[in-house]
Amino acid sequence: MVDESEAATVVRSATDCAVCRRSVLVGEPLTPFHDARGDRHVAVCELCRDRARSRGWAHAGDAVRRRGSTRVRVEHVGGNDGPATALALAPDPEAPFTAPQAAILERAIGLDARPVDPPAPARDLLDRLRRQDVELERLRRDLNPARRAEEQRIAERQQAQIRELRGELHARDRRIEQLQRARHDETSPMRMSGHALDAFNQSKDLERMARIARTLGSPVINVHDEGPGIPRRVRITLSWDIAWYEFTVKLDIGAGRASVHETGTGGEPSVLPLERRRANACWSGSGLKLS
């Protein structure tokens, strides 16, 4: 078991560190340790506490701080007992100190018996210094003109890539909207017939039929959607009393393509089935349109 009173006595009388053998400075704390192998108490400076623990020494009490010189001069001043000598008034080593004597001795040898708080460990200071070095290095990089110029170029390239991606997304959205509209139109034969007439009115065949109409008058126009398919087929039949013409319009609404093909012609409309001679569209100055 550690005798703390004995340890305190050793520390009060110590003048150097038991580990590094360095003379203790004024105001420097000493910590008592117990050396179990040598069965002794020793005083250790603040810098050597970890080394003392690594030797297997056990902490034996609170640290105390030196305040003055460790040299003591004891003299006899005056009196009738003979000349003044240092040994004449030396205390009996076997006699215990009284409280006032102990207080005087503590002041004389420069020790403060009050426990002191140990300073912050050196590793904490090193950690703070390392963090400051890292922060300074970061600030140097941030303030480096070449680095800032490179970061600006990277940011500009990223902005250009973002604009390009936004353009691609916008084009894809338009394409999806076009396909959705095409799918919706394909469900209605009436809308498909209207698209077919628009394609016919933009073709070269319109002008040819217009010349015949100026001679024979307005034709009977029949528009027939042939149903789902890719491409979608719509038949357009124009007939007069002495002639008829038939066209097939191929539609790919999703791709936005349309083509007009002449598929038949004749001189006697009676050869056509009756449903092809029933008018469901009409002729106008701008072309064909649904009735």
Image (tube, rainbow, N blue to C red):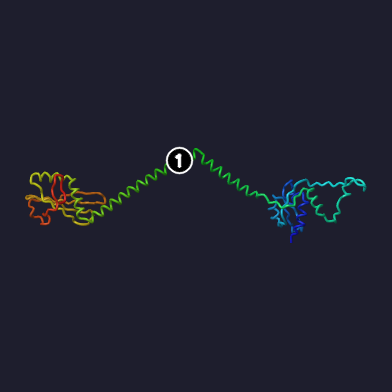
Disc 1 residue type?
Gln
**Relative image position of residue 262 (x, y in whole percent):** 15, 49
| The quadrant where residue 62 appears | bottom right
> Could you tell whether 227 is left or right of 117 in the image?
left
**Relative image position of residue 86 (x, y in whole percent):** 87, 47
> Could you tell whether 183 is left or right of 280 in the image?
right
The residue sitting at 85% across, 47% down in the picture is: 74
* Near-viewer residue (128 or 158): 128
| The quadrant where residue 54 appears | bottom right
Badge 1 crowding class, 10 Å Cα cut-off, few under 14, some 14 to 19, many 20 or more, is few
**Relative image position of residue 259 (x, y in whole percent):** 20, 49
> Could you tell whether 168 is left or right of 262 in the image?
right
* Near-viewer residue (161 or 73): 73
Q: Secondary structure at mark 1?
A: helix
**Relative image position of residue 161 (x, y in whole percent):** 39, 45
The residue sitting at 29% across, 51% down in the picture is: 177
* Near-viewer residue (136 or 208): 136
- Residue matched to label 1: 152
> Could you tell whether 31 is left or right of 290 in the image?
right
* Near-viewer residue (174 or 212): 174
Label tally: 1
Compared to 223, does 161 lie above or below?
above
The residue sitting at 77% across, 51% down in the picture is: 14
Toward the top, the furthest residue is 145
The residue sitting at 22% across, 49% down in the picture is: 258
Quadrant occupied by the N terminus: bottom right
